Image (tube, grey):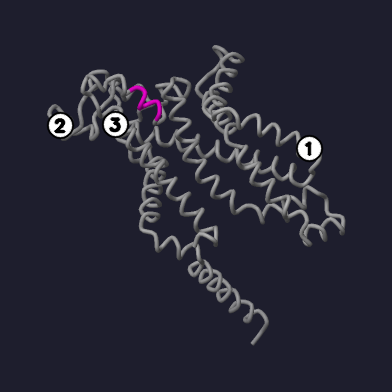
Amino acid sequence: MTAGTNQAIAQPVERRSRLGAILDSDILYSFRRSKVTIVAAIVTFAIVVAALLAPVIATQDPYDLRQLSIIDSHIPPVWQKDGDSRFLLGTDDQGRDVFSTILYGSRQSITIGVMATLFAAVLGIALGLIAGYAGGATDTVIMRAADVQATFPAILIAMLVDGTSRALFGSQRNDTLVFYVMVLSIGLSFWVQYARTVRGSTLVEKNKDYVLAARLIGIHPPLILFRHVLPNVIGPMLVIATINLALAVITEATLSFLGLGLPSTQPSLGTLIQIGQKYLFAGEWWIAIFPGVTLAALVLAVNLLGDWLRDALNPRLR
């Protein structure tokens, strides 16, 4: 048998062994045993996929004014009296289909939450690695900055950044700029937890033999940090990121509810709730309730996934 034939046989065997290792892993076993986690994963997956496929699933584009008619405003859900079969969950004050606005609003909320979480993770992990590895004055400056920020609530930091952007840009502040200001403001609110956790792990890892050996052979500190130390501290970061994703979505919804988030022309779930609460006492509950239920389901499901991931990655909790 030739060497090429042996290599061709070895590759499928190697793929099967890797797949078998994944299927037999403790994390997947823990996932299959938890019915609550499975339901949370299904809910999260369904909401995310529906948001991504909003242009396909939605019955109208709520951002396109040409598709809206004020005559269709304040229509109740289809199962109520005066309901319209065109609008499953009713319409809002601008004649937008509530089901469609939930799909598009979920996409806005999830996108802002994911981008803000990634920004906070990158910033916090980088600063934590530098503080833990460098030590001395660098560590002191970074950690004192983290201590100062930790004294302020996340929502206050986000409001401060948003207010600063309004003062700087004024009338030039368009919808795209508002989107990225939201990402920046929420991301700056959550980097401290990453930095503290990574710093503690880096202080332990930097004195281990593999790091000392890398320093001895002359590998540059940035390569040591990101090639050798980072892979060994990334586990807790996944748990923090999952939980912070839910917090980021909630923070975005809070800012939007307070009128500091996305405009009503391109609403997120928080903006939809803020619009709908004006009509609750008029009996038009569906404008606020359905976006609120969607937001609650998304945040609860992501939190449950974060709790499961924390337990699955911590052998002491198994």
Q: Secondary structure at mark 2?
A: loop
Instruction: Tell me where the magenta segment starts and ends, as one range.
Output: 270-275
- In the rendered image, residue 271 lying in the magenta stretch gets the answer yes
- The amino acid at mark 2 is Gln
Which residue is disc 2 drawn over? 80
Is there CB contact under 8 Å for labels 1 and 2? no
Label 3 sits on residue: 289
Q: For residue 138, which numbered disc appears in the image? A: 1
Q: Which circle, 1 or 2, is nearer the viewer?
A: 1
Q: Disc 3 on helix, strand or loop? A: helix
Separation of marks 3 and 1 at Cα, in angstroms: 49 Å
Image spot of residue 73 (x, y percent): 25, 21
Residue in front for this viewpoint, 201 or 6 = 201
53 relative to 81, above or below? below
Q: Is residue 207 above or below residue 103?
A: below
Q: Amino acid at mark 3?
A: Ile
Q: Nearer the viewer, residue 2 or 204?
A: 204
Give the structural element (helix, strand or loop) at label 1.
helix
Which residue appears at 52% of the width and 69% of the height?
19
- Distance from the alpha carbon under mark 1 to that under mark 2: 63 Å
Q: Earlier in the sequence, mark 1 or mark 2?
A: 2
Q: Residue furthest top?
A: 171
Q: Quadrant of residue 254?
A: top left
The residue lying at 48 percent from left, 31 percent from top is: 251
